[in-house]
Amino acid sequence: MPLEISSGPHFRVKEDSRSIMLWVAIALLPAIAASVYFFGRNALVLIVFTTLVCVAAEALFLRLAGQPVNDIFNGSAVVTGILLAMILPPGLPLWLAAIGAFIAIVVVKGLFGGLGFNIFNPALAARAMLLASWPLAMTTWVRPFDAVTSATPLYLVNKMHQAAPAYLDMFLGNRVGCLGETSALALLLGAAVLYYKKIIDWPTPVAYIGTVALLSLVLGHDPLFAVLSGGLLLGAFFMATDYVTVPITGQGKFIFGLGCGLITVLIRYFGGFPEGVNYSILFMNMLTPVIDKYSRPRVFGSRKT
Amino acid sequence: MKTFAQGINVEHKKQSTEHRNIEEASIPARVVIPLLQHTGAICEPLVKVGDEVVEGQKIGDCSKLISAPVHASISGKVTKIAKFPYPCGADEMAVVIEGNGNTEHRTQSAELRDIVTAVREAGIVGLGGAAFPTHVKLSPPKDKKIDTLVVNGCECEPYITADHRIMLERADAVIQGARLAAKAVNAARIIIGVEDNKRDAVKALRAVIRQQHIQEAPDGVEVISLETKYPQGGEKMLIKTLLDREVPSGELPFDIGVMVINVGTAVAIAEAVECGQPLIKRVMTVTGSGVKEPKNLLVRIGTTFQDIIDQCGGLTEDAAKVIMGGPMMGLALATLDLPVVKATSCLLVLNRKETQVFQEKACIRCGRCIGVCPAGLMPNFLADYAKLQDWDSAGANHVADCIECGCCAYICPSRIFLTQYFKAAKLALHLRRSSCR
C-alpha cells in the first residue's frame, strides 16, 4: 500500500478562501434585501445582472489568460459583482453596469494578476471610472418606493444647506443613494455576521467611522448624519476591509482607516463632490504597500522592529 | 491562566490513548540502531559485524562535543553495519542486531555518577523531538548563569499522550530527574509547565512534591498549569509564558538564564544517574484512525515501525498516511521499514478521509498567518521570497526565527505550504553559511 507523504502540518483548518467569500456574500444579503425593498424589482435585476456579468467576465478572462477556469468557483467574482451593484445608482442602464463589471474584473483585477494581486478594490475602481465617463447617469438618483428623481442627502445638506432627513429614515434606509448604501441597519447586520465569523477585524471600520465622526464634530457638522449618510458604512465594513487591497496587519489597517476617514471628510466638506468614500479608499489602496512596510509585527526576541 | 500571544486552538484528539497505561512492547527479534539519532556529529561504530553484544552495551560513540553515544537495545549478534533508511532524512549508518533471547542487561559503572558524565554515557538527548544532546545542555558556557530549570510537560501537539502518561505514571522520576538536571547547572528554581488538558498530571506531580516535602516556589519545585494552546510546548513560548523572558533572536535559552528539558528526558536523566541505565527505551504513542488498537508503548530504540504497528493490531484497511510525531510538526513516512529513534515520540496513522491533499491557491492577504505566528513573522511575505528563492530577503525578514510550528500553514485559507517554504529557506541559508566557512 503506497503511503501518502507531504510536509507538515498534516491537517488544516476547515475555513478556506471560498468559504470566506461565501460568508461575505451572505453578509451582504440584508443590504440586498433592503435595496430590493426600497428600490423595487429593478434593484434585484441590477444586482443579479452585474453579478452574472462579473462571473462571465472572470470565466472569459481566466480562459484567455490560460489560468484554471475552475477559479471562478472561489467566489470572488460573485462578491465583486454584488459589491459593484451595491454602489451603483438605482435605475442605472444595464449596459453601463455591464461595462462597470467588465472593468472591475478584467481591467482592475485580471490584468494585474488576478485574485490577490490587484492594487485597487475592483468594485470601487470600476465605479470611479463609470463616474468619470458617464457622470450624468452615475449621479441620477431616485427616491425609494416612487422612483422620482431626487438628490442625495449629502448633496442637499452639505452643498445646498437644506435640512437632513430624519435619523430613523436614514437608519432604516428610506433615503436617496446607491443601491446598497442606504440602510444602516442592513449594513450593520451584515457587519455583525462578518465579525462573528472573524472575517473582518475592528481596526479599519473603527478608525474610519471614528475619524469621520470626530472630524465632522470638530468642523461643526452633525457627526451622526455624517456616519449615516453617503456610502460610509458600506465602505467601512465591506470595501475598506477587502483583504487584497488593504494593509495586512492590525496596525496597518488602523492607519488605513484613519487615512480613509481624513480623505472622506476633506472631500465631503471641502471638495467638489458631495461624497468621498469611493476616492478615499482608492487613494489609500495606493498607500497599502508603504503602510505594510512600516507596520510590521515585532519579531519575537528582537528589541524593536 | 497563563499563555502566550498568537498560536492556534486545535482539536486535541488525545482521547483514544490518554487513559491507557504505558505498556512495555515485546522484545523485537531484530533492531536497527542508527549511529546518528541526535542533533550533531554521527557516532563511529564500536562493534564489528559478528560481535556479540549485550543489552545496554555502548555500540557507537563520537569524540566531538555535540554528539551522543548509542547503545544496543537487545542482546544478540551484530549482523550488519550499513546505511539504512532513517526516519528524519537521508540514509544513515546503522548497526543491525539479531537478538539471541538473552535477557542479560548491562548498566554503567558506578564511577560515572557525576551527573553530566552519566547523562552523556547514557546517550541521553532531548526526547521531546529535537534530540539535542542533553549533556551539552547541562554544561553551559562558564559565563552563562542558569537560574531556572523549566520542565516541559505541555505536549501541545494533538494526538500524542506519551508525556502525559509519563507524568502520571513516573511523576517521582520526573521530579527526581529535574532536580538532578537543576543540580548539574546550579539552578535554584524548577518550574514544570503542563497544559490545562492534563489536570491529572498536574495533580500527580504536585502530590509527589508534597510527599517528598520538597521546597516549593520561589526556590524549589513548582508545577504551573497553562492554557491549552498550540504551540505552548515550543521552548521559546514556554519560557515567555512562565517567566516572561524572551530568548533573543539568534540566541539560546541559557543566554537568559534558563534551561528547558522535556519530562521524558527528565525521567531518562533520573534513570541514568540513579541506576546507570542507558537510553535504550522510550515511551511513544501509537495512535490515529488508521491504527486498530491505539496504545502508549515503552519501546526499544531500533524496533521497526512495522513491528510496533503489528503490536497495535495492525493498520486499518483505509490507512493512508503514517507520521512520525504529531500532526503539526511530524514527518510523513514513505515506509514502515524504519527504526524507532530517540526522537520518536509518536506514530500517527491517518485514514484516507483524514489525509487532506490540497491545491495551493493565490494568497488573498487575509493576514491570518501573521495573526497566529508565535515568532512575530509575516509568513505571507516570507513565502513570496522563498518562492522566488530570494534567500537574502527571507533571511533579512527573520526566516531563521521561524520555529516551524506550522500554525501559519494550518490556518491559511489559500492552503499555501508556508511552513514547507520556510524549511527550504532555512536549509538554503544554512547550506550557504556552511559553504562560506
Image: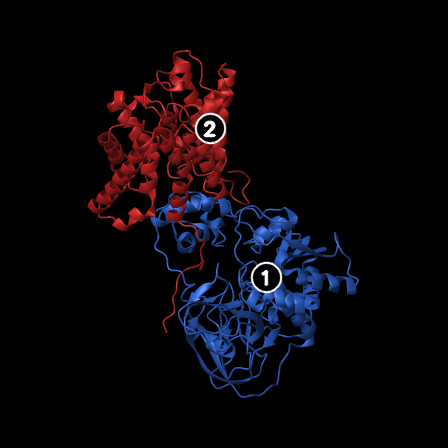
Chain colours: A red, B blue
Q: Which chain carries label 2?
A: A
Q: How crowded is mark 1: few (under 14 residues within 10 Å), some or many (20 or more)?
A: some
Quadrant hosting residue B262: bottom right
Q: Extreme top residue here?
A: A161
Residue B6 visible from this viewpoint: yes
- Dot 1 falls on a residue whose secondary structure is helix
Going 63% across and 68% down the picture, which residue do you hit? Answer: B166
Q: Is residue B31 above or below residue A28?
A: below
Quickly name the residue at label 1: B136
Quickly name the residue at label 2: A208
Residue B21: numbered disc: none
Quadrant assignment for the N terminus of chain A? bottom left
Q: Extreme left residue here?
A: A64
The lab-note entry on whether marks 2 and 1 share a chain reads no
Going 65% across and 65% down the picture, which residue do you hit? Answer: B167
Quadrant hosting residue B176: bottom right
Residue A295 visible from this viewpoint: no
Give the residue type at disc 1: Val
- Dot 2 falls on a residue whose secondary structure is helix
Q: Where is residue A214 in the image (x, y as percent from the top left)?
A: 51, 21
Foreground of the two, A235 or B83: A235
Q: In this view, does A191 lie above or below B207?
A: above
Q: Position of residue A155 (x, y in %)?
A: 38, 17
Foreground of the two, B121 or B85: B85
Residue A214 lies left or right of residue B175; in this view the side is left
Quadrant hosting residue B156: bottom right
Between the C-alphas of marks 2 and 1, the distance is 55 Å
